[in-house]
């Protein structure tokens, strides 16, 4: 009876251990592991605690061995619970990593990059060209004195450019400069009598105009060269090289006699039509030529106003509109596109 009882107890412990093994193998999360721990190792109502309580009913000779077996079973169950917890934690982490995996090879969302404004592009090209020839690049005040804007440039009182309807006057003697030419005087006065002098002046200018080819604010580049023996041939060679740098190597130029108060002689400069290449089209009205800038030899009185002796030095000057150059270069028909900030227009450059 007693030995039978012992065998029964041992068999029961083996069954408990086997049941535990099956349950713990089926546990799929930490919550299930904890429930199994309570069920087998709980101090009250735990299966193993129940087994230990029955050790006292065994024959005295078998009790130590039963106690050892029960303790070994407890140790094995505790070890298995920890092992299963660790396995589940690793599995949970791996599952999370798989679910949250980021494929770094997938293409990203395109971020629209900014574009340089066509006026800025052409301005930079013109500046680069003249810097390569050794010119200084300077800017001047946009608010200018009547003296520098008109008087010193030989523009007499009765000249229509001085009319209130053509210029933005700020006071009796100040206005928004109508061209970049005032810097001819300012630069000569600041550098007299240093020769040779080579400078370009890019900047904003203002006139009371507003239509498809004129804006109240626009950009000019003034050029001035003063030195001993500077000729009209130097002017033409410089402008031909500029035209080729901006419009392409096949470009030709021609000069037509013109009149500006601050140059003598004066010339309008045309380039071969950027649309037809010179054969004649609607843009060039069949002539094959497009007007791009005004130029001439610096008037002796303007040299004197700048502090130079016209008997000793000569010079040439030119003024071009950056908007005009950009319109011809890119085939833009309306000047106002430059200032409406339409992304569809700006993104093309
Ligand atoms: Zn043409």
Image (cartoon, rainbow, N blue to C red):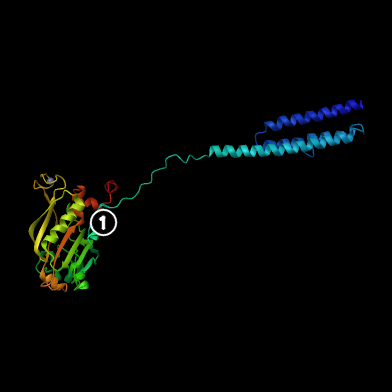
Q: Is residue 325 above or below residue 163?
A: above
Q: Name the residue under label 1.
A: 124
Question: Which residue sits at x=10%, y=70%?
Answer: 300
Residue most extreme to the left: 257
Estimate how packed mark 1 is, as few (under 14), some (14 to 19) or many (20 or more) residues with alpha carbons within 10 Å.
few
Question: Which residue sits at x=25%, y=57%?
Answer: 128
Residue 23, can we see it? yes
Q: Quadrant of the N terminus?
A: top right
Indicate the position of residue 46 as horizontal and vertical percent values. 78, 36
Indicate the position of residue 251 as horizontal and vertical percent values. 15, 50
Secondary structure at numbered mark 1: helix
Residue most extreme to the front: 229
Q: Is residue 248 above or below residue 16?
A: below
Residue 45, can we see it? no
Indicate the position of residue 62 as horizontal and vertical percent values. 90, 32
Indicate the position of residue 13 as horizontal and vertical percent values. 81, 30
């Amino acid at each position: 009876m007693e030995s039978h009882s012992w065998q029964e107890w041992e068999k029961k412990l083996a069954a408990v251990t086997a049941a535990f093994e099956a349950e713990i193998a089926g546990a799929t999360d930490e919550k299930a592991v904890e429930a199994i721990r309570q069920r087998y190792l709980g101090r009250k109502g735990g299966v193993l605690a129940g087994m230990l309580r029955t050790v006292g009913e065994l024959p005295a000779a078998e009790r130590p061995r039963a106690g050892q077996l029960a303790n070994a079973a407890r140790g094995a169950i505790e070890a298995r619970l920890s092992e299963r917890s660790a396995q589940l934690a690793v599995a949970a982490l791996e599952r999370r990593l798989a679910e949250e995996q980021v494929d770094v090879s997938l293409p990203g969302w395109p971020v629209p990059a900014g574009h340089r404004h066509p006026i800025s592009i052409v301005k930079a090209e013109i500046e680069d060209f003249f810097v390569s020839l050794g010119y200084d690049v300077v800017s001047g005040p946009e608010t200018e004195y009547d003296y520098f804007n008109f008087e010193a440039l030989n523009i007499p009182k009765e000249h229509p450019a001085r009319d209130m309807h053509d210029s933005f006057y700020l006071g009796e003697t100040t206005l928004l400069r109508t061209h970049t030419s005032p810097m001819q005087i300012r630069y000569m006065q600041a550098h007299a009598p240093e020769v040779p002098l080579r400078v370009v002046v890019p900047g904003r200018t203002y006139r009371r105009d507003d239509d498809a080819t004129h804006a109240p604010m626009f950009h000019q580049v003034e050029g001035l060269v003063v030195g001993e023996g500077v000729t009209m041939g130097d002017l033409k060679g410089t402008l031909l090289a500029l035209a080729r740098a901006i419009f392409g190597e096949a470009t030709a130029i021609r000069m037509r006699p013109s009149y500006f108060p601050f140059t003598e002689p004066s010339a309008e400069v045309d380039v071969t039509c950027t649309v037809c290449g010179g054969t004649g089209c609607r843009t060039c009205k069949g002539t094959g030529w497009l007007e791009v800038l005004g130029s001439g030899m610096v008037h002796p009185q303007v040299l004197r106003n700048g502090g130079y002796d016209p008997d000793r030095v000569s010079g040439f000057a030119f003024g071009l509109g950056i908007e005009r150059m950009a319109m011809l270069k890119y085939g833009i028909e309306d000047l106002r596109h430059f200032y409406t900030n339409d992304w569809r227009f700006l993104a093309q450059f």
